[in-house]
Image (cartoon, grey):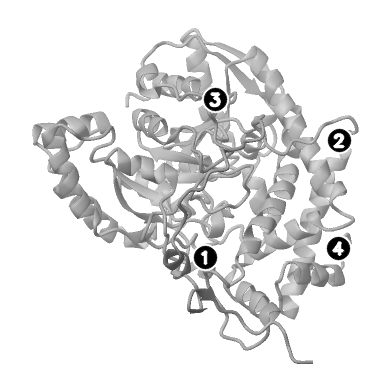
Amino acid sequence: MAVSREDVENIAKLAKLKFTEDELKNLTRDMNKILTYMDKLNELDTDNVEPLSNPISNENVLREDKLEESIPTEEALKNAPDRTDVFFRVPKVISKE
Amino acid sequence: MKVYKNYEEKYKLLKSGSLSLKENVQHFLNKIDKQKHLNAFNFVFEDSLEQAAKVEKKIKSGSAGKLAGMVIAVKDVLAVKDKPLTCSSNILKNFISIYTATAVQKLIDEDAIIIGKTNCDEFAMGSSNENSAFGPVKNPHDLQRVPGGSSGGSAAAVTSGLCDAALGTDTGGSIRQPAAFCGVYGLKPTYGRVSRYGLTAYASSFDSIGPFANNIEDIALILQVISGYDKKDSTSSTLAVENYSNLLEENPPNLKIGLPKEYFGKGLDLEINLTINNVVENLRGHGFSVSEISLPMTEYAIAAYYILTTAEASSNLARYDAVKYGYRSKQKGDLSDMYINSRSEAFGHEVKRRIMLGTYVLSAGYYDAYYGKAQKVRRLFKNDFDKAFQSVDIIITPTTPTTAFKIGEQTSDPLQMYLNDIYTTSANLAGIPGLNIPVGKDKKGLPIGMQLLANQFQETKLLQLAYYLQKSFFNR
């Protein structure tokens, strides 16, 4: 087993997800199967190979530092699940203790 | 209603007044309603009738754009201002776009009529359109079967005549595979040919937007309109867009064709193999040079693809935090609970699985072994194709190892589902264009697709050969 149930629980924490007992069991099984399959890449010698992060050889793209119009505040808040005034509202972050 | 075989014919009918655009749009709306059981559309735009009236006036006055009156459906991962954008996910159930994707805007600017948004796998993650919060799409050729995915709704809509054409997106085959399963043309352009602005990100270094249609002329026309540099997408290419429609008829193109032996081996359905071989023999008979080539990396495509795309997906989907938009859980708790509950309640199984895999391959201690390794392998894929395209212009392969499979048949084994993408993911790893051509049907009456691949920015070659095939062999 490449990935243990505990590993899966830790990964879930990083990914901000939670799972039921059954889901954890299935996910551990599926991830092991898939990751074992992915180990296939180790058959390849890539010692002197440059990684490729973008398939088109683009140069770095820069633009003039000019002020441009952006999305108006009201528009940007239109899909907010909760808001107050011109802010997104979320549960309290800081407690008194 | 008057029938037409492509947009050029439709435009003539519209221009002469023998086809009313309003009636034409109404006809599509009625048909969409009648074919509701296909579940191809997430949203239908009733205001398309008003658009039709406006465009009809423009046609009469002679001020209409290149796509005036073409009725197009767009996959529900593309933004259309003031319309819902759900990505077939509960996490975006009530999201309304505040701007329009560049590719869609370009269609609108040329007076195309957007008739609605098509169903797809959640966040474009899937090969069967079964991972949708709106439920699965059915294959119009056999309602027990999947239409392919992730752009299943777009392919189903085009094959059953619910629109003239559709836009889809392709990260690992999501245009070509459903096009094959549904028997239509579907083109994945070169990475960077079409701006991704307004396309909800799945795997940003793979995602491409492209057209579905029943004929190659319309594919060429739409590609020409949606391609080009966009300052809102820094990865879009500044390379000039060719006049694909004009170049289409330059024939017969003296193109050298390669058949990669790795694509015709174990696992390929016999009927698909025979059908494609038949087409290839015909081409040979017409004087095309055909040679066997080798793409030795092929067997590593699925592994490399799923490492890189799940990594990019886990990063891209971190934005769904229930703060600025999207579903927020009703459960009480602190900020962290809000993130966790909202994401866990609203994302579907496959999306969660990919976020988990991606988080794992990017996590400390595993990054080099998985993500770093796969990026190097990606280079080897690019090298493979670079080498192949030194000796041939076009590579012909099957699009899929089998024809459309049954709904529910493969949902219990995610790895088995991933292996369906064996012939399509390589193009996305290398950033090259790929086109599905419908080339026949198997004994069950299910469409068979053939894939054409060309080097980066060589879309013209794909379209020319497809046009030649359409005319010479398929009498379309």
The CA distance from mark 4 to mark 2 is 22 Å
Find numbered disc 2 in the image and state the secondary structure of the residue it sits on: loop
Q: Nearer the viewer, residue B447 or B340?
A: B340
Left or right of B279 on screen, residue B80: left
Look at mark 2 in the image and give the residue it sits on. Answer: A44
Q: Nearer the viewer, mark 1 or mark 4?
A: 1
Foreground mark, 3 or 1, reads 3
Q: CA distance from mark 4 to mark 3?
A: 41 Å
Q: Mark 4 — residue?
A: A3
* Chain hosting mark 3: B
Say whether disc 4 or disc 2 marks the residue closer to the N-terminus.
4
Amino acid type, mark 2 = Leu
Q: In the drawing, does residue B262 fall left or right of residue B435? A: right
Identify the chain of the residue marked 4, using the numbered disc in the image.
A
Q: Where residue B264 sits in the image (x, y, percent)?
A: 65, 30
Tag 4: amino acid: Val
Residue ranking furthest to the front: A66
Tell me if residue B156 comes above or below residue B92 in the rendering: above
Nearer-N-terminus badge (3/1) = 1
Tell which subunit mark 1 falls on: B
Query: Which residue is pictured at 57% across the width and 44% down the height?
Result: B207
